[in-house]
Image (cartoon, coloured by chain):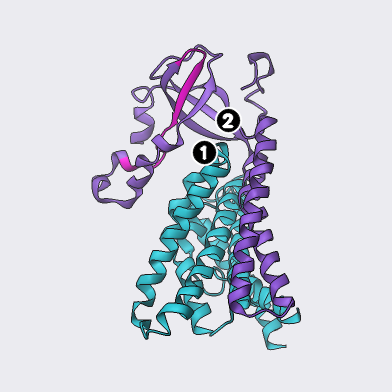
Chain colours: A purple, B cyan
Amino acid sequence: MQPEDDMPDPSNYKAVEGLAKVVAIEGAVAWLEPEQTTSCGACASSSVCGADVFGSRLHARRFAMDNVHELKVGDRIVIGVQESTLVTASMTAYAIPLAAMLGGGIVAHLLGFGDGVTLLATLAGLAVGLGLSRLRAKSLNAKGELTPIYLRHAPSPAQSESCQLN
Amino acid sequence: MQEILMVIVGAALVNNVVLARFLGLCSFMGVTTKIDTAVGMGMATTFVITVSSMGNWALENYLLLPYELEYLRTFTFILVIAAAVQFTEMVVRKVSPPLFQMLGIYLPLITTNCAVLGIALLIVEGHQGFLIGTIFAFASSVGFSLALALLAGLRERLALCDVPRLFAGPPVGFVTASLLALAFMGFSGMAAN
């Protein structure tokens, strides 16, 4: 989390934005839970619809943020990550393991091994790739590039109800 | 090596999974409002399709075919795809919790993406070897990601245009997608040559 003085100007900060709700305060740390952004709440079939799976995943996606904005439990805030961060994160999580996996398989194939050994080499490449991906993610995280930042307070659901109905 | 290149070009461009085979259209329209979300979804789908295709190939050749259980193919493949999505989610969460916060939301959507099952069935019907099958799956999913990124770029530009009110939003998105599919038909000339 950056100090308040270093906060980006929301008017020119190109971010992927999301709503989060403060669910707990522990000392100087606020625990946030991303809000469900689907229209399930307004749908009559929400109880039998597969989209509700996102709701059950919110707890797993809970994350901490330094409470420099004096947040209180129940506050709704807009958080964001830079647009380019999403691409960097995707490349780190998926492209590195995929490249290592395919590299392992192609090397085994070019060395003339059969399908069974190629399969094992591919799995070995995947394991190596996941290790490299973890190292890269640690490095990005240490620089604070993957941390969502506070942008502004969001209106309470009651205030924004008229917008949802329209 | 030339065979591998031919498979990559054929699967990614000539027989593009979205624009030529018309699979995975729900996520094609659903997550293409911004380039960054389209790329995030595309990368996640690429990973899941490649990993699940490896698992499906192994099950098909070491279990279903030897024991003559081909009638269980669709059922088995869906299970493998769900397991691959779960595996990916566990791996991303383990590798980096911040990455999981950002990318985890896309993963359940992939389970119901028909392109994942479609590609696994195409590999089996083509009687491809392990490596060629895996590269076919990878290239097909790269083609899927390419289609997503292209449409997202076009829709970002369309959002700035003065589109007639009745066409604004999804309607003009569908018109754009169909024009993109027509453009990709040009690649079929490569297959003819």
Dot 1: what SS?
helix
Task: Please state which amino acid type lies under the numbered disc 2.
Answer: Pro
Which chain hosts label 1? B
What residue span does the magenta drawing correspond to?
A26-40
| A28 inside magenta stretch | yes
Q: Are marks 1 and 2 in contact (CB under 8 Å)?
A: yes
Q: Residue at x 65, y 61 (%)?
A: A125
Task: Indicate left or right for B159 with B115 as reference.
Answer: right
Which percent across, then down, holds residue A49?
Answer: 29, 51
Q: Is A10 or B139 nearer to us in this picture?
A: B139
| A43 inside magenta stretch | no
Q: Is B145 or B7 nearer to us in this picture?
A: B7
Mark 2 crowdedness (10 Å alpha carbons): few <14, some 14-19, many ≥20: many
Where is B121 relative to B97, above or below? below
Task: Indicate left or right for B19 with B83 as reference.
Answer: right
Q: Residue at x 64, y 70 (%)?
A: B12
Dot 2: what SS?
loop
Marks 1 and 2, Cα distance to the nearest angstrom? 9 Å
Q: Residue at x 74, y 77 (%)?
A: A111
Q: Please identify the quadrant where the N terminus of chain A is shown.
A: top right
Q: Quadrant of residue A8?
A: top right
Which percent across, then down, holds residue A5?
Answer: 68, 14
Task: Please state which amino acid type lies under the numbered disc 1.
Answer: Gln
Which chain hosts label 2? A
Q: Please identify the quadrant where the C terminus of chain A is shown.
A: top left
Which percent across, then down, holds residue B151?
Answer: 60, 57
Dot 2 corresponds to which residue? Answer: A148
Mark 1 crowdedness (10 Å alpha carbons): few <14, some 14-19, many ≥20: many
Dot 1 corresponds to which residue? Answer: B101
Q: Residue at x 53, y 57 (%)?
A: B173
